Amino acid sequence: MQESIRLYCGIDIGKHGGMSYLDESGVLLHYCNFPRVKGNSDYEGYDVEALGRLFDMYKDKYSVKEVLYCMEKIWAIPGYRIQTAFSLGIQLGILRMLLRGRNKCYVYPRQWQGHYWEKLEEGETSKTMSKKVCENLYGVGDDLVSDGITDSILIARYVYDIRNGNIGEIKE
């Protein structure tokens, strides 16, 4: 029997990473870019303390067991610069450390993208497509600067849809 998940946190890792929260009805509660250390534009420039506070922002309302943290599954892709691959590894390590002891699942980019994007039209990018889908689902998109935010919303929504029987299944 599945645990009763009442809060979904979508996490998009990257230089412009973002996170979002959906409640048990799929309502978008919060979204933001990952906090960064002022003056640090490197990939590993996350403000770890501020990020930890964001992961705990609903701890008074939801127990640890009621929250599912949904992260995009990342890996080094041939053609990535060595520094990029290394930095993504650092980010993943930071997030795994902050989320230890919490419910987590991983979603491959092609899974959630394939669910929301039929195909990219001429001149469209993954960023514009994510913004368009978020606009259709939640009325947000144009005001979101970061594709990390739009992607995190769609990652959380994808897992929400799966757990609520709207589409296939994921591995947790």
Image: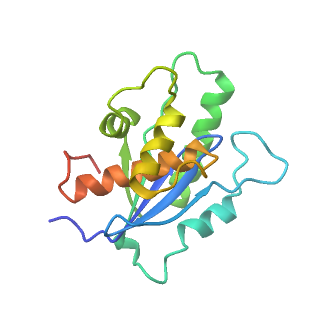
**Quadrant of residue 83 within the rendered picture:** top right
Compare residues 147 and 96 and report the one nearer the observer: 147
Q: Is residue 121 left or right of residue 171?
A: right
In this figure, which colouring scheme has been used for the structure? Answer: rainbow
Q: Is residue 124 left or right of residue 47?
A: left
**Which residue: 63% across, 61% down?**
51
Q: Residue furthest right?
A: 39
Residue 14 % position (x, y) = 59, 40
**Which residue: 60% across, 65% down?**
52
Across the whole image, how many numbered discs are drawn on residues?
0
**Quadrant of residue 157 within the rendered picture:** bottom left
Instruction: Give the answer, above or below, for where 2 lies relative to 116.
Output: below
Q: Is residue 1 left or right of residue 47?
A: left
Is residue 100 visible in the rendered image? The answer is: no
Which quadrant holds the N terminus?
bottom left
Instruction: Give the answer, above or below, for where 3 lies relative to 141.
Output: below
**Which residue: 69% across, 51% down?**
46
Instruction: Give the answer, above or below, for where 68 lies relative to 128.
Output: below
Q: Residue furthest left?
A: 1
